[in-house]
Image (tube, helix red, strand yellow):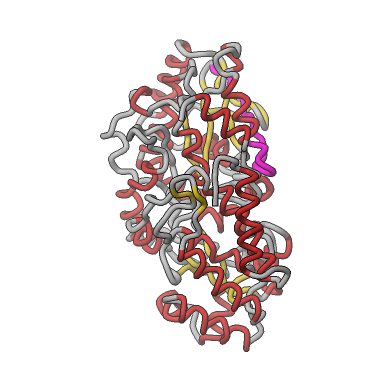
């Protein structure tokens, strides 16, 4: 997919209405409510020497580093953990003599991708200080940019295989183009777990121990039976049918699009079948994710037992900073759930044509390869980072625990899940297909359409969005 192909994708651009990774639409609103209070930068073996090196590098680089992103998550990571970054205001910073300009456009209605596409399509003719230098992508649409000439190969930055050897392979697979060229790096891994309410578990099951609760959700048949048990006690097993969607969609055996034809995988249909049963039984609702109704379960009065997600869900989305919330009281716990899965993530890409190669290289190396910096991200930000030795060590570290999870160290659960992730069925159409499928199936779940009618709504919506596809 070359530059012309990106123009085509722009013309049929996706309407992105749901979060797909760390700090997508949800974090556009949620992360501003949880601004990091940490103002200290992470100390390296010689912080002064590092900052001097950054200043020396910046003298040889372009004077403006334009960063394109959808919220302030990456900005906060840079501010808190990158030696030499200083904040000027909400949209500007400094690295040595380089001015960092944050171009933040929310994901809502695909605005971020549209803005980034327009900027990249004008990259060659743009003035030097106006060019895109660094941009962020999420898993559901990463291939759109990776399989184009707009994302630079990591090797062209001077980053080697040895530098990234400790990163989880799946995080590299997502941003590897069709020719096997790596074109982005991430500081985080996003294996998913099931977060559940300790108080509800103790009331209904007599224990909140993760190993015991896991027995209640060890597979989908058991999960379904447990939903009946929870309903009898006055609780819903999840807030919405959509909460379990990513667990099913990450365990498919085929892609959304096969040889230009829209394909609904058998495992996706298993989600539909189970969700319809749960909705009809009143054991989950049909709330759109990230809305107020869906979020009520973050508080005890919401009477929701569980949510599925990676570390970023509790970090950005579960109101842990709000007084009275379950997370604020340390009332959640984590267990594996019926199946392993991953959800989202944020990748750093260097834009072709940047004049800040050395600075981008240093940012990538420090935030995604430096083990000590990455450990500090875990401790200070409750994130799961993209460094296997660091995560394996911290999973065994009895001094580390999550306040949101009531003092639990969940890293062992995350580590077990991340080893089995299979990204072979990702495609450039995932976000659009996922969004339209959930929208169509809501009609079916609520009784406003038959299953076949809902499928037809889905097919037509996807073809309208991607005219090159058939069904």
- Where 218 falls versus 71 (above or below)? below
Range drawn in magenta: 98-112
At x 53%, y 31%, the residue is 135
Is residue 60 one of those drawn in magenta? no
**Residue closer to the observer: 365 or 470:** 470
At x 39%, y 64%, the residue is 413
Q: Where is residue 111 in the image (x, y as percent from the top left)?
A: 67, 37
Q: Position of residue 338 (x, y in %)?
A: 44, 71
**Residue closer to the observer: 181 or 22:** 181
Q: Is residue 297 visible?
A: yes
> Relative to 165, is 9 on the left or the right?
right
> Relative to 160, is 133 on the left or the right?
right
- Where 271 falls versus 428 (above or below)? below
Q: Count every numbered label the image shows and give the total.
A: 0
Of all residues, the one furthest to the front in this rendering is: 470
At x 33%, y 58%, the residue is 420
Q: Where is residue 306 in the image (x, y as percent from the top left)?
A: 56, 71
Q: Where is residue 142 in the image (x, y as percent from the top left)?
A: 49, 40
> Relative to 114, is 162 on the left or the right?
left
Q: Which of the 4 image quarters holds residue 322?
A: bottom right
- Where 148 falls versus 395 (above or below)? above
Q: Can residue 34 be seen in this view?
A: no
- Where 446 falls versus 393 (above or below)? below
At x 57%, y 24%, the residue is 120
């Amino acid at each position: 997919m070359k530059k012309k192909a990106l123009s085509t994708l722009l013309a049929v651009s996706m309407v992105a209405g749901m979060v797909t990774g760390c700090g997508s639409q949800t974090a556009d609103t949620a992360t501003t409510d949880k601004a990091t209070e940490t103002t200290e930068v992470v100390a390296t073996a010689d912080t002064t020497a590092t900052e001097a090196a950054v200043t020396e590098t910046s003298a040889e680089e372009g004077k403006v580093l334009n960063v394109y992103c959808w919220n302030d998550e990456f900005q906060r990571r840079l501010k808190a953990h990158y030696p030499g970054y200083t904040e000027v205001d909400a949209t500007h910073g400094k690295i040595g003599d380089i001015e960092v300009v944050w171009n933040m456009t929310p994901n809502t209605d695909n605005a971020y991708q549209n803005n980034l596409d327009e900027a990249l399509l004008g990259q060659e003719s743009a003035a030097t200080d106006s060019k895109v230098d660094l941009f962020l992508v999420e898993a559901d649409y990463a291939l759109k940019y990776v399989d184009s000439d707009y994302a630079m190969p990591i090797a062209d930055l001077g980053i080697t295989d040895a530098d990234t050897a400790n990163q989880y392979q799946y995080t590299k697979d997502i941003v590897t183009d069709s020719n096997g060229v790596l074109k982005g790096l991430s500081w985080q891994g996003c294996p998913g777990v099931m977060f559940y309410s300790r108080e509800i578990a103790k009331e209904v099951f007599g224990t909140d121990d993760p190993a015991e609760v896991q027995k209640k959700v060890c597979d989908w048949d058991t999960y379904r039976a447990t939903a009946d048990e929870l309903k009898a006690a006055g609780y819903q097993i999840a807030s919405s049918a959509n909460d379990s969607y990513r667990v099913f969609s990450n365990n498919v055996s085929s892609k959304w699009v096969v040889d230009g034809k829209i394909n609904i995988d058998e495992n996706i249909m298993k989600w539909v079948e189970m969700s319809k049963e749960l909705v009809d039984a009143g054991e989950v609702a049909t709330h759109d994710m990230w809305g107020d109704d869906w979020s009520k379960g973050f508080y005890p009065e919401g009477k929701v037992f569980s949510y599925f997600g990676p570390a970023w869900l509790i970090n950005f989305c579960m109101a842990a900073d709000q007084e009275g919330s379950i997370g604020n009281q340390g009332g959640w716990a984590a267990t594996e759930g019926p199946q392993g899965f991953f959800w989202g993530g944020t990748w750093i890409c260097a834009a072709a044509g940047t004049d800040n190669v050395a600075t981008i290289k240093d940012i990538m190396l420090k935030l995604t390869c430096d083990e000590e910096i990455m450990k500090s991200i875990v401790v200070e930000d409750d994130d799961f980072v993209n460094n296997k030795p660091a995560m394996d060590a911290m999973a065994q570290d009895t001094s580390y625990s999550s306040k949101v999870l009531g003092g639990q160290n969940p890293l062992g659960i995350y580590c077990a899940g991340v080893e089995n992730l299979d990204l072979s069925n990702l495609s450039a159409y995932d976000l659009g297909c996922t969004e339209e499928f959930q929208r169509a199936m809501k009609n079916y779940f609520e009784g406003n359409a038959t299953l076949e009618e809902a499928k037809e709504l889905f097919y037509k919506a996807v073809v309208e969005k991607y005219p090159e596809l058939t069904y």
